[in-house]
Amino acid sequence: MGGGIGGLLLLLVGAYFGVDLSGITGGQQASSGGGQQGQAVSGDEAFQDCTSGQAANEDVDCRVIATAESLDAVWGQLLPGEYAPPQLTLFTGAVSTACGDATSEVGPFYCPGDRTAYFDTAFFQELTDRFGASGGPLAQEYVVAHEFGHAVQDQQGLLAAVQGDRAGADSAAVRSELQADCFAGVWAHHAASTPDPDTGRPLLQPLTQTDVSDALSAAASVGDDRIQEAATGRTDPETYTHGTAEQRQRWFSTGYDSGDPGTCDTSAAQL
């Protein structure tokens, strides 16, 4: 399972954040040129236009790239010798991955087959317009940090447990997603104090309470209960795959308040 913020709700109420695409599309191998009727560019290729903080503040693609750089710096410091930066691909329209073909409707997702995080940044407007999240930068960066949280899980061998337990309020899928939310909070805790290896300066300015509120708004907007209620007028905990709005906010806050990945062990925690 690649994981994501909206995940297997694709099967229930439409396409939101990332999914395990292999069971839906047949698991075609990734290509370097992007997907059907779409365009894709790697983070390295895109970075040539994203060489300043101003660019990251003004351009959403550059913001994703800068956030990925910050995530690599933070996790490299927290897990020295263990963390390997995942690949980053920005795409529009559609993209081919080792987990299968995906369209923009899927939203951001992480594919363990090629260890790559995929983002169509047009989704961030959808996050605000369709899901009612705040439009602040940290709401978007939370999404990036969540997907990189899945990369950390992948590297630690934590994603395999999801395969046989993909739905339910107490399922391994929900526990995995809430841990990725917690890992996003851990990154936010350290983002303004961890220096970029290339410049020696942190990539983010100190976070304000408004910034944190924006991230919490994004986390709540993609809770299973919030999405199901909006789509069908009711909720079904037996089909939950990512956790409730309250749970997603709480686990992000757990990581943010502690800054310690050890507090993010959701495997046996009271959710």
Image (spheres, helix red, strand yellow):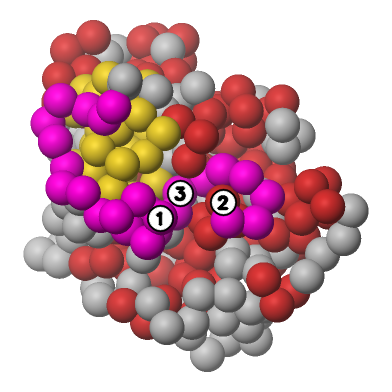
Mark 3 → mark 2, Cα distance in angstroms: 9 Å
Q: Which residues are magenta?
A: 11-36
Mark 1 → mark 3, Cα distance in angstroms: 12 Å
Q: Which residue is rendered at x = 14% and y = 36% of the image?
A: 31
The disc labelled 1 sits on which kind of residue? Ile
Magenta segment's dominant SS is loop
Q: Which residue is rendered at x = 62% and y = 83% of the image?
A: 170
Quarter of the C terminus within the rendering: bottom right
Q: Is residue 215 left or right of residue 71?
A: right
Q: Position of residue 6 (x, y in %)?
A: 56, 52
The disc labelled 3 sits on which kind of residue? Gly
Q: Return the residue at label 1.
A: 24
* Mark seen at residue 18: 3
Can residue 252 be seen here? The reply is: no
191, 170: nearer the viewer: 170
Q: Residues within 10 Å of mark 3 (few under 14, many from 20)?
A: many
Quarter of the image for residue 208 reads top right
The disc labelled 2 sits on which kind of residue? Leu
Q: Residue furthest right?
A: 233
Circle 2 SS class: helix
Q: Return the residue at label 2.
A: 10
Residue 17 falls within the magenta-colored stretch: yes
Quarter of the image for residue 108 reads top left
Can residue 20 be seen here? The reply is: yes
Contact between labelled residues 2 and 1, with CB atoms less than 8 Å apart: yes
